[in-house]
Amino acid sequence: MTTISLNRNAVKLVQDAIDHAEEFQIKSWKADCGATLVDMGLSCPGSWKAGQVFVEAGFGGQGRAGYGRFEIGPFTVPSIDVWVDNPVLAVVASQAGCWELGKGAFAEIGSGPARAVALADRWSGHGYRDPDPSAVVVQLQTTRVPSDELCRFVATACHVEPEQVYVVFAPTACLVGAIQVASRTVEQVMIKLFLRGFDIHAVKFGFGTAPVAPLSGDEGEIMGRANDALFYGATTVLYADVPDEAITSILPTFTFDVNSGEFWGMPFARIFERFDRNWFAVPDLVDSPAKVIINSLRTGHSFVGGQINLGVLARSYFGYEL
């Protein structure tokens, strides 16, 4: 049984950010039930440092986040680059945004290592059990402070005391929100591979990079821009202990590219409207990666699928035609 504790690792990262709240431009306080709430962008600016903590806490400490640059015609935007160890733990059992914490348009989504304790969705777990009595949930696309009821719900689902719950949150329409969406490169690919029967436990390491979208105060607009980063601008590299045939048989089947039908080339804001701004109604074909490279550790060969679409990014981000 593993001694790795995703939640303990995440608590250390979050607590360090709380200890440097002024530097990180974040806020924290206790809910009535005793849970710790950590605001990284709703009523405070957040920061690049806070964005790194948000992402790395979501990995349960099994990955690292950094920043680069991404060129879109004459424009330069930042990128969020992630390096992931133990991808099954880091992104499937932990980071995946799959825990439905609300209903309807802009419904709150739970992410982070608390999922690996609650086992509340079909992706969490995979044989892993966290030995630590704490729970860190990273709440996504929220436009309000998490309620005491939500904190108690997480505590009950994770079989821990409310005082052991940390809820880290940010709306999409802030710097940390845009960063965390674009950080989901490896996660997105691992989930797609699992859906198609690929042995995800054979994936030993992952790397991903995607642009951080220009910010907007409108949650709908930034939701579109931030997800365009994944669907049209992301590149994910995986290192898998499988034969070449396992890669070549699956790689053409799960990227969002020119062969994906009517939605490809459409900015995500328009796609999201088509499905009443409900993430759980967006078709699997749309919620797919842009460009994927898989390296076989057995043969040393690498294979690529999908494509980047700078034209959509230029229109979405800047209203500019390349």
Image: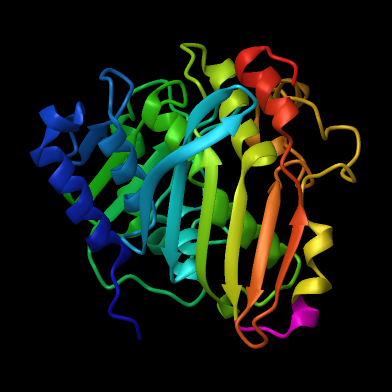
The magenta stretch is 241-246
Residue 68, x across and y down, in percent:
43, 41
**Foreground of the two, 2 or 53:** 53
| In this rendering, position of residue 279 left or right of residue 196 | left
Mark yes or no: residue 29 visible. Answer: no
How did the renderer colour the structure? Answer: rainbow
**Which corner quadrant holds the C terminus?**
top right
Quadrant hosting residue 239: bottom right
Give the camera-side residue of 212 and 282: 212
* Residue 242 locus on image (x, y percent): 67, 83
Q: Quadrant of the N terminus?
A: bottom left
In-front residue for pair 51/91: 51
Query: Is the residue 178 above or below the residue 92 in the image?
Result: above
Question: Which residue is at 28% across, 32% downward?
Answer: 148
| Magenta stretch contains residue 273 | no
Q: Is residue 275 left or right of residue 58?
A: right
Q: Position of residue 52 (x, y in %)?
A: 32, 43
- Measured from the top left, where is residue 46 in percent x and y? 28, 27
1 vs 57, nearest the viewer: 57
